[in-house]
Amino acid sequence: MAKLDISNAHKQILAELYQQARLTVDQLPYTDEFERLYTEFVARSGRTLTRNEVWRALASVRKRSGLIRKER
């Protein structure tokens, strides 16, 4: 799988959108909340990434401790 090229500014957008979400990263796929996050990310970033790429980027930011910790 190729490495996803995403800027720090785009990572910040993802972090901000995630902070507004009620669900954890692991709970987001296939939910209306993820669809909202995805749509807002594409609108704010101007990037046309797939849903999978946005989720991978979100998971990557989480692995680097770039997201707030949420209770399950």
Image (cartoon, helix red, strand yellow):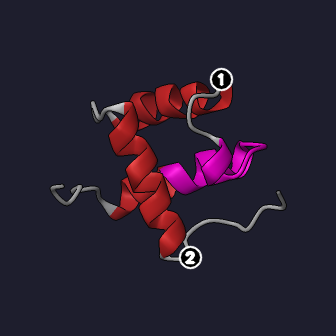
Closer to the camera in the image, 46 or 39: 39
Q: Amino acid at mark 2?
A: Ser
Q: From which residue to which does the magenta span run?
A: 14-27
Marking on residue 69: none
Give the quarter of the figure containing the N terminus: bottom left
Whole-percent x, y for residue 29 in the image: 56, 37
Residue 9 is inside the magenta segment: no
Whole-percent x, y for residue 71 in the image: 84, 61
Whole-percent x, y for residue 52 in the image: 37, 39
Closer to the camera in the image, 39 or 4: 4
Residue furthest bottom in the image: 64
* Quarter occupied by residue 32: top right
In terms of sequence position, does the residue under pointer 1 or pointer 2 come before the other?
1
Q: Residue under circle 2?
A: 65
Secondary structure under the numbered disc 1 in the rendered image: helix
* Quarter occupied by residue 48: top left
Give the quarter of the figure containing the C terminus: bottom right
Secondary structure under the numbered disc 2 in the rendered image: loop
Left of 17 or right of it: where is 52?
left
Whole-percent x, y for residue 10 in the image: 39, 52
Q: Is residue 13 above or below residue 31?
A: below
Q: Amino acid at mark 1?
A: Asp
* Quarter occupied by residue 11: bottom left
Q: Is residue 3 above or below residue 50?
A: below
Q: Residue under circle 1?
A: 32
Question: What crowding class fits label 1: few (fewer than 14 Cα within 10 Å), some (14-19), or many (20 or more)?
Answer: few
What residue is at 47 percent from the left and 65 percent from the top?
61
What residue is at 56 percent from the left and 25 percent from the top?
35
